[in-house]
Amino acid sequence: MNMPEELVSVILPVFNEEENLPHLYEELKKVLSENLIKHEIIFCDDGSSDSSRDILRNLAAKDPCVKVIFFKRNFGQTSAMDALLLYAKGDVIVPMDADLQNNPADIPAMLDKLKEGYDLVSGWRRRRKDSFLTKTLPSRIANYVVSSVTGVRLHDYGCTLKAYRRDVLRDIRLYGEMHRLIPAYVGWAGGKITEMEVNHRPRVYGKSKYNLYKTIKVILDLITVKFLLSYSTKPIYFIGKWGLLSLFMGSCSLVWSAVKRFIFREPFYTDPFFTVGFFLLMIGIVIIFFGLFAELLMRTYFESQGKRPYLVKETVNIEDENK
């Protein structure tokens, strides 16, 4: 008995890519059709201000395999990825960038690798065609930090081109810049992960949407992800060790102040070491805890009410069940 053919959902966030979209569509269709891959191609227009919306409408009108989500305004790449994951119907999910720097010709090899029993095949842009100082170097630093913190060691977290089994993405909700950290969730869930080298091409049309500030946001999101993956069901372990450290440092400060008081006759209220150190430590811990708990409260707000941090204006060639 033959196994049913798997549906592959190629998902692409789009923001002002009018010159790239026609070429990207033609390349994708050629690769998917020549390799007899059952597919759907889903674009999410993230509030484009150029003619990207009209181009996507035309593509969807001539090809029922093309599906489009239109946001009411620009919500960012992570929100677009979250919407794309929600609407995708495939057994396999293949995210890509819409700027033609990812090569669609890599998709068949990634799908073959996935069939070896992996839940995630992550692309590695070993030979990047980007500026070293503004993109490649910050990316390498971020990859090292993310790999060290999460324990999921990849060379290229920032490469959008990946192939996922749908099952490992079922319960993922994305916020901030967390689309780049999905492999950490997959690893935490026990998914089997591998990495393969993919082609990377220089940008020919349009302008890059990447900036160094996004790297900072990824690091901040990494702190949140580490907290959620390691301590969301046992926060006392996280809070407790900081509490014990605080008590230890406070006790040391009090002992030192007592020594100064009884040996050097220096009153407590004139001891700057004790006063400044104690308050700075307490204020820093309180700020961190407020930030983490605010993140948890925000997620509870959205998920308990079935709300998402973006607004869909309309969809094309997509069933209404997720609207």
Image (tube, rainbow, N blue to C red):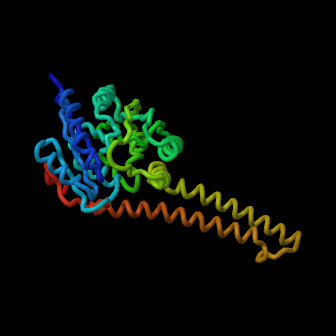
At 50% from the left edge and 65% from the top edge, which residue is drawn? 290
**Viewer-nearest residue: 298 or 137:** 137
Note whether residue 80 is visible: yes
277 vs 152, left or right, is right
**Viewer-nearest residue: 59 or 297:** 59
Residue that extends furthest to the top in the rendered view of this protein = 1
16 vs 123, left or right, is left
| Rendering quarter of residue 168 | top left
273 vs 315, left or right, is right
Please provide percent x and percent y for residue 240.
57, 57
Please provide percent x and percent y for residue 34.
19, 27
| Rendering quarter of residue 32 | top left
At 19% from the left edge and 49% from the top edge, which residue is drawn? 56
Work out which quarter of the rendered image holds the C terminus and state it. Answer: bottom left
Please provide percent x and percent y for residue 36.
18, 28
At 32% from the left edge and 45% from the top edge, which residue is drawn? 205
2 vs 23, left or right, is left
Note whether residue 231 is visible: no
Work out which quarter of the rendered image holds the N terminus and state it. Answer: top left
Please provide percent x and percent y for residue 145.
53, 44
**Viewer-nearest residue: 179 or 77:** 77
At 20% from the left edge and 35% from the top edge, which residue is drawn? 29
